[in-house]
Image: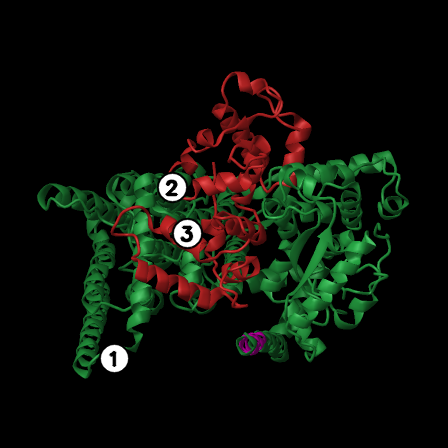
Chain colours: A red, B green
Amino acid sequence: MGTTASQLPKESLSEYQELTFLTKQEILLAHRRFTELLEGDERNHPNPRVPMDAILTLTELKSNPFKKRICQVFSTSENRDGSLTFEDFLDLLSAFSDSATLEIKSHYAFRIFDFDDDGTLDYGDLEKLVNCLTGETADTRLSSEEMRQLISNILDESDIDKDGTVNLSEFQHVISRSPDFVSSFKIVL
Amino acid sequence: MANGGSFNVNIYEEDYDYENLGESGPSQDPFQLFKEPACNVQGNPGDIQMEMFTKNSDTSDSESTSSSKESYNGCRLRSLQRNNWSAATRRVLSSMPSRKIGLHSSAGMAVRETCALPTHQTSSRVSLHIPRVTQDDITSPEFEEISTEDEANNLAGSGLWCTETNKEQLVSDLRGLSESEGLRKLRAMPLSLADKMEIRKHFFSPLAKNLVINRNFPCRNLPCMYLSRMWRHCRYAPRFSTSLKLWNSSMKKLSGRYGTGVLSYFTFLRTLLFINLLFFITTFLFLVLPQAIHPPPDSHGESFSWIEIFTGMGYLSRSLMFYGYYSNITIKTTSITSMVPYCIPTAYFFTITISFFIICIILVYSMSKSFGKSFQVFKSDGNLSENVFCSWDFKVTKKPSIRLQSEKISTQLKEQLSELASREEERTLMQRFRNFLVHVAAWFICLASIFFSALGVYFLSKTISKVLQNLDLLFMAAVVSGFNLLLPGIFNFCAWMEKHNSPCTRVYVSIFRNLLLKISLVIILCYHWLGKIAVEQDPQVSKCWENFVGQELYRLLLMDFIFTVLYTFLGEFVWRIFSQKILRKNRKPVFDIARNVLELIYGQTLTWLGVLFAPLLPAVQIAKLFVLFYMKKNSLMLNCQASKKPWRATHMTTAFITLLFFPSFLGAAVFVAYTVWKIKPSSGCGPFRNLTSMLESVKLWAERMKDHHQILSWLFRAYNAFTDNPIFLFMPSGLFLLLIYFRIQVVDGQRRIIRRLEKQIDDVS
């Protein structure tokens, strides 16, 4: 099921094609990029796992403020350290691909934004999210007063059951109203 | 307990008789504790299966069931009871998009929660919170606690799919569906690839011993299975959309640097290229090629000078490029056509009209798809939560662009926050009056400039009555393109003066003014051509008025291209050098998306107007678009920076496709229809010479054909009946109006329900 040597076996290729939203060319390209990230001796390993630092050298992820969260969400490692196997990598690309459904994208977006992995977006998660969006520099960051106002407005608008957090359904409800989400939640190799 | 192969669908039928539910329904729960989930109106039995699976996983243990029963009852008491909704209300509610999304992800939620929970739970009994919608309490998600035992040890590894019974149940649930349905459902589940592959192994296992499986699996013998597997491979083979992968790498680089807004311009350009390609292929195969093989007898070679490329006169005017070359004969000379004579005038007419018809359908289809995607087309700036959750563009990869994007989002958020804060402030009367005056002045300037430019073009067209030579012919086209280039600058200045509140309004206003300018210029030109040239048919101007109009349009298209090149060079390249070296500012010019897209639409309108008179004009447009892509891309990379203003890409793309259809394509179609129907073709040239109208050629052809073929005479009679009897016009339009009214009422009803629900939630919480 994993990759053997540097060639992708045909059955695996068709299986990946059926189970992900990627096309054959995209899977082959992903395989090529993934093997480039491996060290020489790891390439013969049956199911190699690339550490997070190597994944973050990809140009598509290098400057993304959510890069660490993305790796952690898609990682299936025991200690959730963000390392990815080839299949995790395909999962990542499939969720960010052109043909992925809105449900898949919103599901993974929710998990990426849920910084503390507790299943809901509470004040801390939203604050970290806004800080990621607005960047590092001092003049783009929101002041604490603005942040407080912003988050209270967000919770007013999206928290339907008024429990102080945004859960998955509420998040998906907001997302479904925005037509730009599907086109902006994309990473293409 | 394993799910049986036969499911009871009775509960569904009373409420969802009009929906296709697929092959399965809810299982018969012996405990009758839980109401069956009932909202899967799109016929996704897989989702019901998922819910059934997660629900059944706890009925395997009576102990856990009893505890869950208690918690369930407790939940019921706590939950919002909405038992007074009618069946119709429930039906409408269940089809709301957010409902369906919730259902699909309930499975994923279950898995994720079990993966996340081990860090919090140490006991062997793990509680899962799964949002559930039941038949009675359909308006509120009911939270049930479901315990699964002996799973805490296995949770960290493989999530929910640890026990054999669970896997088998899920597999048998999926197997209730057809293969493609099941695979599609599996693909759309937010599980890891390893889990999906395990499930798939069971799903497609040919050696299943379970009787249930054999009953449901339609194809038991080996050849059938191989065939179905091959069919699956064919379906998942490279999809046809990958054939539209022209320029993919360039567009990826552009989106990496500039974001989705600029990308939408290039996508629009690519779409136009393909539309023109389609048009060109049709006219080439059916019109140009037959005529090229049989050149008319009176054509003779002429000397060719380079200026003629620009003016369209001389050699070009007597070539396949223009209307005048085409003859009105019926080709019978070759072996094929001696059996089936090929009549060129009819071919000309039908090729053009059918191509227009096909493009109309394509545009309406893409417009409706676009509208469906961005439903809230006429709503202004989204609310804050949408901006926070949806505004990050993951395609942007370059560091400086990411910084710019962060700046953009930050500015947008701050602006919205300050707007919210200052909403209560009323501006003083003086301020409002001053704003009003500024608006009036700006509109006056814009409208006056449009009016005077239109007037100028009108008088210019009237004074060009004598035959001009060479480059003087280009003067008119240059004037029109010059107006198109300069006046938007004035509009930008007016917009800067006005300082609109929201950037959305500013974009709309500038698009509207630009559009008004282009429409008025094109209308003046069309009136001049159809109202004067065609009617008077002055032999001094041209022996063949269609050729003249075709050449005018060709020149306009060419001048438009030359001026675009000039603008790109001067407006972007020189401006950047100027601002960097002389003004010493580090600001590069910004790519004006709206203006460039309107230029594209204008060029396309000219092509569509001219295709009747110059069948090879789409080829010219294709070449122009091709060169334009590379020129704009390079200029963008060298000279421009990403915009700091937010640009709602899907929204604006919908607006642009609408503009492409409504004034542009429909206007051209009306122009062509009027020409074909009312205007007398010139008597000396072209395939319709010596007829009173182009339409007449079809009538004559139909008369001739009627005697030979029965089908055609029947068609003809049907056509006559259709056009003579007005009831055939009223009935379809009445039907359409009814449909539209029905849809409007449904949407209105949904809105009202949402408002009531929100009010109820407010009252309870």
What is the chief secondary structure element of the magenta stretch? helix
Say whether residue B226 is left or right of residue A25. right
Nearest the eye: B344 or A36: A36
Chain letter of the residue beneath label 2 in the structure image: B
Say whether residue B447 is left or right of residue B81. left
> Which label belongs to residue B426?
1
Q: Earlier in the sequence, mark 1 or mark 2?
A: 2
> Which label belongs to residue B762?
none
Say which residue appears at 43% left-offset and 54% top-offset.
Answer: A124
Task: Give the CA separation, mark 1 to mark 3.
Answer: 34 Å
Nearest the eye: B187 or B360: B187
> Which label belongs to residue B256?
2
Whether tag 2 and tag 3 are in contact, CB under 8 A, the answer is: no
Residue B265 point in image, percent of width and height: 38, 50
Residue linked to disc 3: A129
Say which residue appears at 68% left-offset and 47% top-offset.
Answer: B123
Residue B252 found in image quarter: top left
Q: Residue B319 lies in magenta, yes or no?
A: no
Residue type, numbered disc 3? Leu
Binning the other alpha carbons within 10 Å of mark 3 as few (below 14), some (14 to 19) or many (20 upward) gives many
Residue B560 point in image, percent of width and height: 28, 51
* Eye-nearest disc, 1 or 2: 1
Nearest the eye: B374 or B49: B49
Q: Residue B756 lies in magenta, yes or no?
A: yes
Say which residue appears at 57% left-offset and 47% top-offset.
Answer: A100
